[in-house]
């Protein structure tokens, strides 16, 4: 393979990935990605018929005949679902297999025809980028431009529909018409992509980029952009991997790249990723441990204990040694606690912070009994959690709403320190 | 058309056993609205099947082949993990998981299939029902069926017994999972039992029917029967009847037109569904 | 399994202690605490999203508790399940499901350990009796999808009756039900109460509360009040139940969600 042909092929795969990502974003947001799977299977008979009519693999004819079958399959799914008691998943599965079976039967007819074995139609099953021609790439580019322009021009209605069809209807958009346009775009993109990625795995290219992008941004525009990039990258990277060995189908490699990217995203994405959740949990735990430790020392001080040791803290609260150690050293780094000859004391900063926790705890208990009708013996548990969560703003609201009570429901004093100003 | 040979008879017996097993399981998949998970399983067992074939040329290694069904269960676990733990929406969890496992399977084939005629990329999709007679078991000159028949046969009996004995369990979890759980019924166990059976049947019918078309066996007869009846037991009987007719007619048509057999069977089943749907649509106006 | 012994008299039917439930990190039930009496018709009221249905599900162990526990007749649910009949919302199922009225009511007799056995004569008799009580015997072979909303609800209640429980938890049984059925169901429930059964009903319509119940649980994510109906049905409680979430409370709910904060801390407990 020449270097320029390789570049062409990779360009083609990039284009396919990019437009799948763009169109797939809407399918993802509408939770209709599995329809994409049905469509890609259902296009097979369209492609074979297109080939039988023309006698060659003309990309434009194939795209047209494939798209028609794609639209028929979407219509079939909706019809079966709406006109019978069968649920949507059953309808999708029926359409997928029946159309695919039709395609398979037609394929076996072609295979027996004189030029059948040379037709290369089987490359549509798993995709074979190596067989792409310059003619194909030009066709891809034209479709790509058309799809992107349509998406830009019709961004507003598509955005409303992706948010909610009812909402879009309320805004005065003709929902049915735009959903049809979206279906046409989906079918065209899938048909175009089949030669590169294949019938069986095309749906993943629709789902993956949108799913990944969703985890990195909340804005639809950014999401579209990102999923175009991810799609293009998966196409190119998968293509390179598959071209490294003869007789290697392209589709599986694209999907493996994409799935890897999805897993990485699910793990590392900001806020919604697994790691972010874990580290949030860790920070929560750390904060709770430190604040609880301060609070415990303060409670001991309130009791008049001025020889606070590790042991007396452990007598007051049950906690793991490791958690205790970590919390204690963090607090001494912050300059809130001191230890002198095994006697633990709070610094001025520590006292203020400890009193803040105790204050929040007792204010919340007050709030529960005074405003929410809780009984005295049922307020402590919630307050143990809430004391870590009340922000400075909320604290102010709380104090003012309760009019700075001096005692909590258990007649313990509420320490205000400098908080009243 | 030539007369059907005894080889055709063996192929037909195999196809019938597969279609009956699928029909029974498919009814519950349909009622549980888990057809898509079933679809995912049929694709995802591919890596397991490929490994089984690589380990000892396929059919001879019953235990290894059954082990391949593990991938089916793994699929449901991964989907559940992505959906519940990592909060990826459900359709995307299903769609990405099965395409990925299937992709891994295809890559494995591409790497190792050189010179190994037992498994190739196309057979994965369509199966080779027409060749199933080749692994005949002959004893003292009598044909005792084929290896495939002896593999799927016990599985069909197992499914039959489990579904008859455990009918109440499958029925109640299909109707109302929450209610079943409120009675202390271990919903998860029943769910996984169903998924394991689907995985096993898929693995055992892979060679003959292929990954995608087996979904047709799973869903077309039950869906058609559901349109025709509103009693669970009757649906099972009608479904098995339709499956039988579909296999016989489809097989004959495939011979007649000289095309691939299992796609032709699915196409026949699909045509029967289409007819039923059109007739039903004209006779009743459905409330939805 | 020996039949669990339920003591009559003054004991509590349901005891919920400090129960919290979160959905997607958002607390939907917060520190709910209640003791419900036996032999009463108990209504749970609150606006949409106030956690009414979730409370029933929590009692039945269908949603995990982030904190707290539930006792039924002073025992764990698992030891006493046969004495509790749960009637989920009517919309929670696909009524096209291929089953007859009779087949659904038979599910009331299903038990985990007996799923592989045939139903006995007694089972079938109890199913007939239950159908008779809700006036659905003549419909027993009807496909459930062909029934009206009211009839479907009766089928669900018959299924609970067939179980022969002592405690009944009904989730919105009067939604989409005609007036005649509502009256018929209510008469039946009053009858059951007279037999000493305890009936707990999640209900959304405040107008009919006084005519239906003699005991009320008022819920708004947290417990507002529970007790005899004439004691708790005060303007103040009604405002707290239906007047929307207090601002401060709602803000805290949001903070908990954003920070994934555990609703109950673990491993650092006061002695």
Image (spheres, coloured by chain):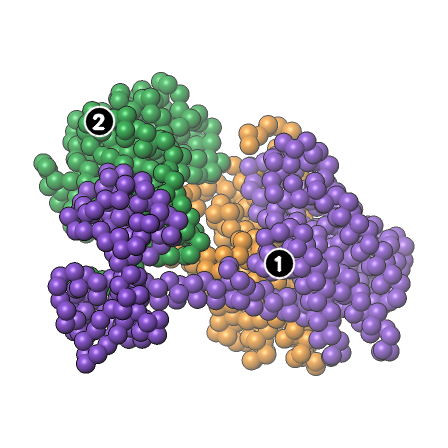
Chain colours: A purple, B orange, C green
Element class at badge 1? helix
The one nearer the camera, B255 or C94, is C94
Q: Chain of mark 1?
A: A
Residue drawn where x is 78% and y is 70% of the image: A10
Which residue position holds label 1?
A: A213
Q: Residue reaching furthest front?
A: A421
The one nearer the camera, A102 or C238, is C238
Which residue position holds label 2?
A: C229
Q: Give the x, y percent position of residue A321.
A: 25, 74
Q: Give the x, y percent position of residue B195.
A: 47, 58
The answer, for residue C72, to whether it is visible in the render is no
Q: Chain of mark 2?
A: C
Any mark on residue C270, and which? none
Q: Give the x, y percent position of residue A7.
A: 82, 72
The one nearer the camera, A421 or B15, is A421
Decide: is C116 above or below C233. below
Residue drawn where x is 21% and y is 46% of the image: A406
CA neighbours of label 2 inside 10 A, class few (<14), some (14 to 19), many (20+):
some
Q: Quadrant of residue C183?
A: top left
Q: Quadrant of residue B261?
A: bottom right
Labels 2 and 1 within one chain:
no
Q: Quadrant of the N terminus of chain A?
A: bottom right
Residue drawn where x is 55% and y is 37% of the image: A85
The answer, for residue A169, to whether it is visible in the render is yes
Decide: is A219 above or below B115. above
Q: Is residue B221 left or right of residue C74?
A: right
């Amino acid at each position: 393979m020449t270097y320029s042909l390789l570049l062409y092929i990779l360009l083609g795969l990039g284009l396919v990935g990019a437009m799948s990502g763009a169109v797939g974003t809407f399918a993802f947001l509408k939770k209709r990605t599995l329809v994409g799977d049905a469509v890609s299977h259902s296009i097979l008979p369209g492609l074979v018929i297109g080939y039988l009519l023309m006698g060659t693999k003309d990309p434009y004819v194939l795209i047209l005949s494939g798209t028609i079958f794609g639209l028929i399959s979407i219509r079939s799914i909706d019809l079966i679902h709406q006109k019978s008691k069968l649920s949507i998943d059953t309808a999708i599965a029926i359409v997928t297999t029946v159309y695919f079976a039709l395609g398979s039967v037609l394929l076996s007819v072609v295979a027996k025809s004189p030029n059948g074995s040379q037709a290369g139609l089987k490359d549509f099953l798993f995709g074979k980028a190596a067989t792409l021609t310059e003619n194909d790439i030009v066709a891809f580019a034209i479709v790509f431009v058309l799809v992107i322009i349509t998406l830009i021009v019709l961004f507003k209605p598509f955005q409303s529909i992706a948010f909610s069809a009812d909402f879009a209807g309320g805004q005065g958009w003709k929902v049915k018409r735009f959903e049809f346009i979206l279906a046409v775009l989906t079918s065209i993109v899938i048909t175009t992509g089949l030669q590169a990625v294949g019938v069986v795995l095309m749906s993943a290219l629709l789902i993956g980029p949108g799913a990944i992008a969703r985890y990195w941004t909340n804005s639809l525009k950014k999401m579209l952009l990102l999923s175009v990039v991810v799609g293009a990258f998966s196409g190119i990277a998968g293509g390179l991997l598959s071209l490294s060995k003869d007789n290697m189908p392209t589709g599986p490699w694209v999907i493996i790249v994409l799935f890897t990217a999805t897993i990485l995203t699910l793990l590392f994405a900001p806020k919604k990723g697994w790691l972010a959740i874990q580290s949030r949990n860790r920070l929560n735990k750390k904060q709770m441990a430190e604040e609880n430790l301060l609070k415990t020392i303060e409670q001991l001080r309130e009791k008049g204990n001025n020889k606070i040791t590790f042991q007396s803290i452990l007598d007051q609260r049950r906690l793991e040694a490791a958690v205790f150690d970590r919390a204690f050293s963090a607090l001494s780094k912050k300059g809130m606690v001191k230890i002198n000859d095994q006697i633990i004391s709070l610094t001025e900063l520590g006292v203020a912070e400890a009193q803040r926790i105790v204050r929040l705890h007792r204010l919340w208990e007050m709030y529960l009994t005074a405003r929410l009708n809780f009984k005295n013996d049922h307020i402590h548990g919630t307050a143990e959690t809430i004391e870590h969560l009340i922000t400075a703003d909320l604290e102010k609201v709380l104090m003012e709403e309760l009019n700075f009570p001096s005692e909590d429901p258990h007649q313990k004093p509420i320490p205000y320190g400098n908080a009243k100003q | 058309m030539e007369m059907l040979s005894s080889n055709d008879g063996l192929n037909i017996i195999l196809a019938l056993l597969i279609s009956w097993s699928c029909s029974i399981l498919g009814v519950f998949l349909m009622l549980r609205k888990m057809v898509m998970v079933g679809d995912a399983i049929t694709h995802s067992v591919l890596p397991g099947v490929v490994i089984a074939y690589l380990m000892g040329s396929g059919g001879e290694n019953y235990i290894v082949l059954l082990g391949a069904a593990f991938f089916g269960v793994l699929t449901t676990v991964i989907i559940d993990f992505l959906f519940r733990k990592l909060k990826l929406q459900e359709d995307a969890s299903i769609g990405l998981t099965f395409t990925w496992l299937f992709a891994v399977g295809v890559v494995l084939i591409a790497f190792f299939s050189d010179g190994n005629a037992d498994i190739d990329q196309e057979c994965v999709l369509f199966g080779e029902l027409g060749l199933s007679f080749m692994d005949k078991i002959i004893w003292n000159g009598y044909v005792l069926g084929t290896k495939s028949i002896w593999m799927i046969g016990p599985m069909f009996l197992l499914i039959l017994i489990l579904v008859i004995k455990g009918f109440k369990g499958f029925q109640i979890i299909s109707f109302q999972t929450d209610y079943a759980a409120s009675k202390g019924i271990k919903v998860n166990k029943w769910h996984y039992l169903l998924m394991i059976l689907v995985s096993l049947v898929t693995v055992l019918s892979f060679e003959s029917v292929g990954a995608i078309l087996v979904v047709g066996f799973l869903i077309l007869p039950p869906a058609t029967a559901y349109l025709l009846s509103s009693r669970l037991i009757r649906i099972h009987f009608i479904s098995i009847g339709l499956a039988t007719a579909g296999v016989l007619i489809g097989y004959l048509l495939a011979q007649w037109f000289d095309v691939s057999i299992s796609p032709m069977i699915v196409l026949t089943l699909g045509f029967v569904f289409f007819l039923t749907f059109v007739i039903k649509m004209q006779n009743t106006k459905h409330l939805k | 399994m020996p039949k669990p012994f339920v003591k009559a008299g003054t004991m509590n039917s349901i005891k919920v202690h400090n129960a919290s439930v979160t959905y997607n990190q958002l607390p939907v039930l917060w520190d709910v605490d209640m003791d419900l009496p036996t032999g009463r018709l108990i209504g749970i009221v609150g606006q949409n999203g106030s956690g009414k249905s979730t409370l029933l599900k929590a009692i039945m162990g269908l949603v995990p508790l982030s904190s707290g526990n539930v006792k039924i007749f002073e025992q764990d649910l698992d030891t006493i399940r046969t004495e509790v009949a749960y009637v989920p919302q009517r919309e929670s199922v696909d009524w096209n499901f291929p089953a007859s009225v009779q087949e659904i009511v038979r599910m009331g007799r299903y038990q985990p350990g007996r799923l592989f056995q045939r139903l006995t004569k007694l089972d079938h008799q109890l199913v007939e009796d239950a159908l008779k009580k809700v006036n659905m015997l003549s419909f027993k072979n009807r496909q459930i999808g062909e029934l009206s909303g009211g009839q479907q609800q009766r089928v669900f209640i018959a299924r609970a009756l067939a179980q022969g429980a002592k405690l009944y938890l009904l989730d919105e049984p009067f939604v989409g039900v005609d007036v005649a059925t509502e009256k018929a169901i209510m008469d039946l429930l009053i009858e059951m109460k007279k037999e000493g059964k305890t009936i707990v009903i999640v209900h959304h319509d405040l107008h009919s509360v006084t005519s239906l119940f003699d005991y009320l649980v008022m819920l708004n994510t947290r417990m507002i009040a529970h007790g005899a109906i004439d004691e708790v049905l005060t303007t103040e409680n009604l405002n707290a139940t239906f007047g929307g979430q207090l601002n401060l409370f709602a803000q805290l709910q949001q903070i908990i969600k954003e920070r994934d904060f555990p609703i109950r801390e673990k491993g650092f407990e006061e002695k």
